[in-house]
Image (spheres, helix red, strand yellow):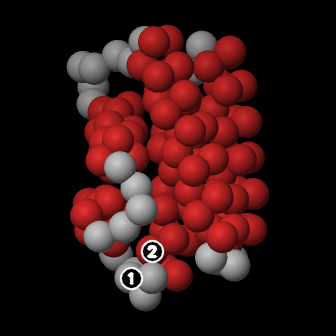
Amino acid sequence: MSAEDAIARAKRYLETAELLINEGDYASSVSRSYYAMFYVTRALLERSGSKPNTHSGLRNQFGLHFVKEGPLSEQFAQMLNDAEEMRTMADYSNEFVLTIEDAQMTFRDAEAFVDRMSVLLRDES
């Protein structure tokens, strides 16, 4: 997937996440927010020659290449980790119920994350 395709997909997912918050579907919103982050992260990693096969591999490689060795602060790794954790709970937990606050926080983090990763992707083009 090209950088522009990844950015466009992430932006569409963010639009959908916001609509889902407004509809009261917080679990689905969290999932779309996380996947917006996922696609721009995967595009960055592919550019660096890394192709992780799992979500945890994606997070680990992002932390290594773009936080520990790279231009980003730990804040971005934490945003990605938090969103993936919320997405996992949203998708798989029978007991955990997401709130509007959870969905809004994940959405705000995803917006900031996608904006920053989009700059990196465009700078590397």
- Most distant residue in the front direction: 71
Around disc 1, counting alpha carbons within 10 Å, would you say few (fewer than 14), some (14 to 19), or many (20 or more)? some
Label whose residue precedes the other's in the sequence (1 or 2) = 2
Quarter occupied by residue 97: top left
Q: Looking at the image, is 54 positioned above or below residue 78?
A: below
Q: Residue 80 at x, y = what percent?
A: 38, 46
For label 2, the SS is helix
Tell me what residue is drawn at x 62 percent, y 19 percent. 21
Q: Residue at x 45, y 82 (%)?
A: 48
Where on the picture, by quarter, is residue 3?
Answer: bottom right
69 to 26, vertically: above or below: below
What's the CA distance linking mark 1 and mark 2? 5 Å
Within 10 angstroms of label 2, few (less than 14), some, or many (20 or more) residues? some
Residue carrying label 2: 45
Report the front residue among 117 and 20.
117
- Image-based side of 75 in relation to 123, left or right: left
Labels in figure, total: 2
Can see residue 50?
yes
Q: Nearer the viewer, residue 73 or 34?
A: 73
The amino acid marked with disc number 2 is Leu
Q: Mark 1 points at which residue?
A: 50
Q: Position of residue 94 (x, y in %)?
A: 27, 25
**Residue 106 location, x and y as percent?**
47, 29
Who is closer to the viewer here, 88 or 6? 6
In this rendering, position of residue 23 left or right of residue 104: right
Tell me where residue 96 appears, x and y as whole percent: 28, 20
Q: In this view, does 47 lie to the left or right of 23?
A: left
**CB-based contact (under 8 Å), mark 1 and mark 2:** yes
Callout 1 secondary element: loop
- Identified by mark 1, the residue type is Ser
